[in-house]
Amino acid sequence: MDFNTLQARIASCMGISTLMPMQEAMGKVALPCRAMLLAPTGSGKTLAFSIAFLRSLKADTEGVCGVVLVPTRELALQVYDVVRTLATPEFKVAAFYGGHRMETEVNSLAGKPDIIVATPGRLLDHLQRGNLSVHDVKSLVLDEYDKSLELGFAAEMSAIVGRMKGLKTLILTSATALAELPTFMGKEAVSVYDYSNGDELKPDILFRLVESPSADKIETLEALLRDFTDEKTIVFVNHRDAAERVWGHLHKHGFCAGLYHGGLEQEQRERAMVLFANGTTKILVSTDLASRGLDIDGVGVVVHYHLPVSEEALTHRNGRTGRMGASGLAFAIVSDNDKIPDYFPTLERYWPEGSSEPKHQGTSTLYFNAGRKEKISKGDIAGFLMKKGGLGRDEVGRIDVKDHCAYVAVPSDKATNTIKALSPHKIKNVRVKVSLIKL
């Protein structure tokens, strides 16, 4: 694909009319290439590497021609959405990751995808089963490659790359400093595109310390959250059971909060993220699973309920706010039991007032039991809601279409009547059940 086509598609499909310098550079890099892209979280790195990756592909290639490997299923879904948006209709894109049925992915291969976005373990599983071949793949992206190595995927990535006999373009990305290169990359030179220290990409984050009078910080957390009821907030904890406990306390005390950790089913995690992104919930209680690979707009506050275990973890947690030039707030709650790490900067204190009551934000989410695989698009759903549901254009909020379902944000006071209005009607001649997601 050529850069002009990609720019036009980015503007029309993603609403981005001006590219960041890093994205412009990826639109002009000489191909084929062996490149390392370094940039902080929230800087538009996914779009940047997607531009170079798609430029390197030819639409008339037989079989799989491009692969993007990512460390987590959440990042797989995020990258898939971006790549698919830009690659359609020239290329078919499939996503492979754990947490859903292998049969679903095998069926997607019947459509002969040109591009695969996958976690290393899942893709290698398909290769070992003989479900597909990557022998003729010309372009490969190892997104957040350092995280993949940290998670123990070196052997899987090496096995996959070893099967790519025609590989020409290789792009690695990282949100942190230049890490050790994987040995399977060989000894050929790599061009480094380093945007990690660019002033235009530095996050604007005000970091403060909050002292808790007790080792159990839950009351201090509650008071802090009451000071920022209008801000989208992520509360980070270090363990799954702590996430459950904190979320349960907040839910019991009237906060609209979501729960996110690796012990939940994929559908539960997906739903929590959708509701947080579309404003139905303003608070997300999470382990470090949410600290990398998730592109969530408008996060105003990050809270370290438990102190991060490393400087890198601190960087990635704080990187959820202050993204793409926006400002953000980060708070670390500490008690006498905590030892402040050496890598923490010297922080000013913040004393929560806790005077505001938690409130519902006025947004609810409708669930459609049909999605992409049923040929239902965002445009179909928006039109359905306005023509049959009685909603105005400005009342149809964020729409997230998944393989077999969709989520739509609507005003809470219109949700029940909208469902009733839609119930007698079909969307694209498909009978779809629409229901309200209860918090």
Image: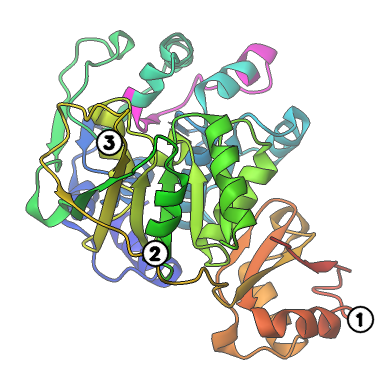
Image disc number at residue 354: 2
Q: Say which residue label 3 marks.
A: 314
Task: State the residue position of label 1.
Answer: 424
Q: Position of residue 347 (x, y in %)?
A: 14, 45
Q: Note whether 144 is above or below 79 in the view shown.
A: above
N-terminal of the two: label 3 or label 1? 3
Q: Nearer the viewer, mark 3 or mark 1?
A: 3
Which region shows up in magenta? 126-146
Q: From the viewer's perspective, is 151 left or right of 250?
A: left
Confirm or deny contact between disc 3 and disc 1 (CB under 8 A). no
Q: Is residue 137 magenta?
A: yes
| Tag 1 secondary structure | loop
Q: On the rendered structure, is 405 left or right of 352? A: right
Q: Residue at x 86, y 76 (%)?
A: 426
Pick the front one: 102 or 75: 75
At label 3, the amino acid type is Leu
Q: Residue at x 66, y 63 (%)?
A: 407
Label annotation for residue 208: none
